[in-house]
Image (cartoon, rainbow, N blue to C red):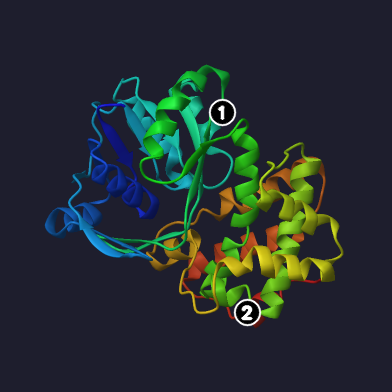
């Protein structure tokens, strides 16, 4: 097991994983923004979950040094390149584990740090970070790890062993397919960010449900036509099925297999809504924007993802949510 672990990006996932590793006896430190670090140093990190809450006294700092054997890169997608430049300045050979939404982080990290150092990790988990020093795990979790490049294959086992101490983790043969599958689920993030509604409420609204299904269907078809396949998980099979069935037949599948993961009274809002609530930047260009860019490249219209991207950008710029009615006025079904 590596001697030292750095979690670069102490937000919801980074703080949660770091706390779990610390409790498992791993030498880990969180690297985060000043407000988060100050809160953790003063009071400890409050980790909430279905089985109660606990304070974890995990080391935290605002700067990354070169002593880590593995760096868990948990910054947002839009911050990957800047973070990797910081890592490159350390001149170490630490394994860097990309743990972002979207599909670009492996390539962006490798362009700066080299292909041999990068191990990919897809996060299938819901967590919340809205208050300094407090994180909450909202659902059970599964991490998928794999080598995005042949040059980094030898580093996967150590990452698998490490992350398994924190969250259920499995190795996958094709991390790119797992990333594209997760992207389909994240296309919904824009709906909650734009409306400000929690996911359990938004995905039971008839109009927003229809918009969500249309957005996923468009995403799956665009990805497939662009040469990007999904993996073989149950969720991927659900997405593929939704993309081929007539719209009315997609409703029960969507409600049972996707929306059903969040009860109607759930207050959980996905990461993009949390970014809005923290007055942070948006990752929508790495989510819906990925489908729009691919659609432009292959000559396929993507009106649902393009519409959500446009309205999402406007909401982040104005600081004002739209009602479901206002949002739906921008789409034709």
Single out the mark in the foreground, 1 or 2.
Answer: 1
Can residue 87 be seen by looking at this rendering? Answer: yes
Sequence order check, earlier mark of 1 and 2: 1
Residue drawn at x 70%, y 42% is 230
State the residue at coordinates (55%, 73%). 200
On the image, the x and y values in percent for residue 186 come to 59, 56
Q: Decide if residue 298 is on the left or right side of residue 26.
A: right
Quadrant housing the N terminus: top left
Can residue 112 be seen in this snapshot?
Answer: no
Secondary structure category for the residue under label 2: helix
Which residue of the protein is positioned furthest toward the right in this rendering?
246
Which quadrant holds residue 327?
bottom right
x%, y% of residue 112? Answer: 45, 26
Q: Nearer the viewer, residue 126 or 35?
A: 126
Does residue 229 sit above or below 251 in this rendering? Answer: above
Say whether residue 323 is left or right of residue 294: left
Question: Which quadrant of the view contains residue 302?
Answer: bottom right
Res 324 label: 2
Quote the CA–CA distance across marks 1 and 2. 39 Å
Left or right of 273 in this view: 18: left
């Amino acid at each position: 097991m590596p001697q030292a672990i750095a979690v670069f990006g102490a937000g919801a996932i980074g703080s949660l994983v770091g706390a779990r590793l610390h409790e498992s006896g791993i030498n880990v430190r969180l690297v985060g923004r000043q407000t988060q670090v100050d809160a953790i140093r003063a009071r400890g990190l409050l980790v909430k979950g279905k089985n109660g809450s606990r304070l974890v006294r995990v080391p935290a700092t605002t700067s990354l040094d070169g002593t880590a054997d593995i760096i868990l890169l948990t910054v947002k997608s839009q911050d990957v390149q800047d973070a990797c430049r910081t890592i490159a300045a350390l001149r170490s050979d630490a394994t860097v584990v990309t743990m972002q939404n979207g599909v670009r982080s492996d390539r962006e990290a490798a362009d700066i740090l080299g292909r041999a150092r990068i191990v990919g990790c897809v996060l299938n988990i819901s967590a919340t970070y809205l208050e300094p020093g407090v994180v909450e795990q909202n659902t059970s979790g599964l991490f998928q790890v794999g080598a995005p490049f042949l040059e980094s294959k030898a580093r996967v086992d150590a990452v698998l062993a490490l992350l398994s101490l924190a969250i259920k983790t499995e190795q996958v043969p094709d991390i790119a397919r797992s990333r594209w599958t997760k992207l389909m689920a994240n296309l919904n993030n824009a709906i909650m960010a734009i409306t400000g509604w929690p996911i359990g409420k938004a995905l039971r609204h008839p109009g927003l449900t229809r918009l969500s299904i249309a957005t996923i269907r468009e995403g799956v078809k665009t990805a497939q036509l662009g040469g990007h396949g999904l993996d073989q998980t149950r969720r991927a099979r659900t997405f593929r099925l939704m993309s081929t069935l007539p719209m009315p037949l997609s409703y029960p599948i969507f409600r049972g297999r996707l929306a059903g993961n969040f009860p109607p009274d759930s207050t959980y809002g996905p990461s993009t809504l949390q970014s809005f609530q923290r007055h942070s930047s948006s990752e929508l260009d790495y989510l819906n924007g990925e489908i729009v860019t691919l659609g432009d490249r292959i000559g396929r219209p993507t009106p649902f993802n393009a519409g959500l991207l446009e309205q999402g950008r406007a909401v982040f710029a104005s600081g004002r949510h739209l009602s479901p009615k206002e949002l739906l006025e921008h789409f034709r079904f």
